[in-house]
Amino acid sequence: MERTEREIIERLGSRGLRKVLADLLDHNGLVRLANACGLRYPGMRTQSQRTDRILADLVDRAGREESVRKAIVRSLRKETAGAAKERSALSPEERARQAEDWSAAGRNGRTGERLFLLASETGDGSADAALSRILAEPEADAASGPAERPGGPPEPHPAAREAARLEKKAAQLQKKIAHLEGQIAKGREGEKALKRDLLRRKGELAEAQALNEQLRKEVQDLRSSAANGAAQAAAPAPIESALAEIAAGVRRLAAEQRRLAHRLDKLADAPPPRASVPPEALEPTLRAIEEMQKESSALRRERRKDHQDSAARMDELLAETRAVRAAVAAALPAPRGPARRKGEPERVGVFIDVQNMYYAARQLKGKLDFDALLQAAVRDRRLIRASAYVVETKEIDQSGFIAMLQQRAIEVRRKTLKVRSDGSMKGDWDMEMALDILDAAPKLDVVVLVSGDGDFTSLVSRVKAMGPRVEVIGFPRSTAKSLLEAADHFQPLDRKFTIRTEPPPPRTAGAAPVPGDAPPAEPRPEPDGPSR
């Protein structure tokens, strides 16, 4: 029958327990044991503590806390398992002789192991006697103290003692000088690194200033094109094509209106019908004229609406241009937030592209498990911010899904899907996500982007240039290759990160979606791979 943890610790005592821990565990083993016992040093890592301090703290808490005693005894039994098995195979007489030999040998390299085995045994008093004799042995360094025994060598001359003291002090000064020389060398290396970093940042600043100047010129060109009613050649390609399409639509409507007005004028200038024509024959013509008048009025209203839509589109284009300029200004080197102190966990920001992840998870016939996603993104680091970007429509209720995200302390950014007059839709979050990430980057050590969209590749490069590392989390089949190559680390998602769902029943018009599942905000094809 084995002794309890309390009995073993009490038999060893503070001095014996310290000797056992020091002999059986190295510094890394003591650190693991301290972590298992919940021993913490605020503001400092346990790994950086001195071995004697960790030993003293473990011995002190073992005398007060039962959980610490259990953890220490469990670790020591694991370290002495082989020796305990050999000793248990001996007969009682052989164990007693072995205990006598151990007590006669005194303290040596295996004293800690022997003390623990003797303290753990039950039975006759041979183990107790041997344990007491070994514990009574003085420490090796205590035997070499300054006390002088009778009949010993004569005390050294004071001059010799002073010379020894000066030699010792000189050796200490030499060590300090070597340490300071090493620190000076490190400082010089750090100065060179800072100079290189300063030159690199000056180049980035010049590049950003040139880009800012280019954007300023493009904004001026856009403003002049809006005032003149036509796009200028200096406008970006997407804006030029959009303005050209709007102008073409306006021209088509104007031509159609002119044709209708010409037809109406011809009908108005036509001579009145002869009296011989019966009134019944004129009724179809009159009805056609009335219909054409109604159609002309409708076309005029539609033309006014198109002009209004064109003006609104121009306002949107100008707003997007200003946003790009703001993003460029935000990308300029700026003072970062408070630096992370030594021993503190890394600061993490998580940004989730909900629409992209929804379609990628649907390929696996499931929906994304946000608990598993957050655990994989944060790990043992400090979460500063978690944001999810959702596109809503008036036809589908996503309140259950949004409430689920908010319960997990995820900030939900919501945008309503816009449907234009030509049937096209607008509801992406790419620009806003980029701005949020650039704003938060100076306060983070790691940016986690949960998306497979290749449009974020240039954003990843810009954030890395600002300092934080960038990690991408996504499904391998739907993640762009350029995004994988730009990120510092890629965390692939598989079925472990999805919640399996059965095929949903046919949904009738107006039926509410399943709570917790993010319905698609707009029709889009299934992604067939990472080529985006």
Image: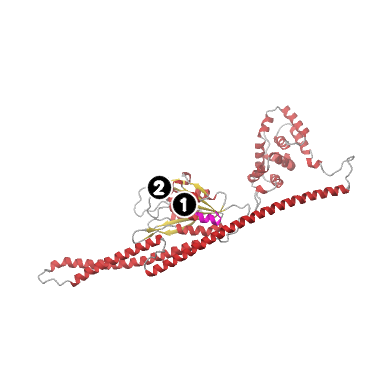
Circle 1 sits on which residue? 451
C-alpha gap between disc 2 and disc 1:
15 Å
- Residue drawn at x 78%, y 33% is 104
Q: Secondary structure at mark 1?
A: loop
Report the span colored magenta: 460-468
In the displayed structure, 198 sits above or below 308; it is above
**Circles 2, 1 touching at the beta carbon (< 8 Å):** no
Q: Which mark is residue 436?
A: none
**Where does residue 449 sit, x and y in percent of width and height?**
49, 53
Q: Nearer the viewer, residue 176 or 122?
A: 176
- Do we see residue 159 in this rendering? yes
Q: Nearer the viewer, residue 369 or 277?
A: 277
**Where does residue 121 sit, x and y in percent of width and height?**
70, 34
In the displayed structure, 344 sits above or below 281; it is above
Q: Label 1 is placed on what type of residue? A: Ser
Q: Label 2 is placed on what type of residue? A: Asp
Quarter of the image for residue 301 reads: bottom left
**Where does residue 273 sit, x and y in percent of width and height?**
13, 71
Q: Nearer the viewer, residue 376 or 99?
A: 376
- Please report whichever mark, 2 or 1, sits nearer to the chain's N-terminal start: 1
Q: Main secondary structure of the magenta part?
A: helix
Answer left or right for 61 relative to 359.
right
Circle 2 sits on which residue? 528
User: Per the image, is 476 magenta?
Assistant: no
Taking the view exactly as shown, the residue that stands out farthest to the left is: 276
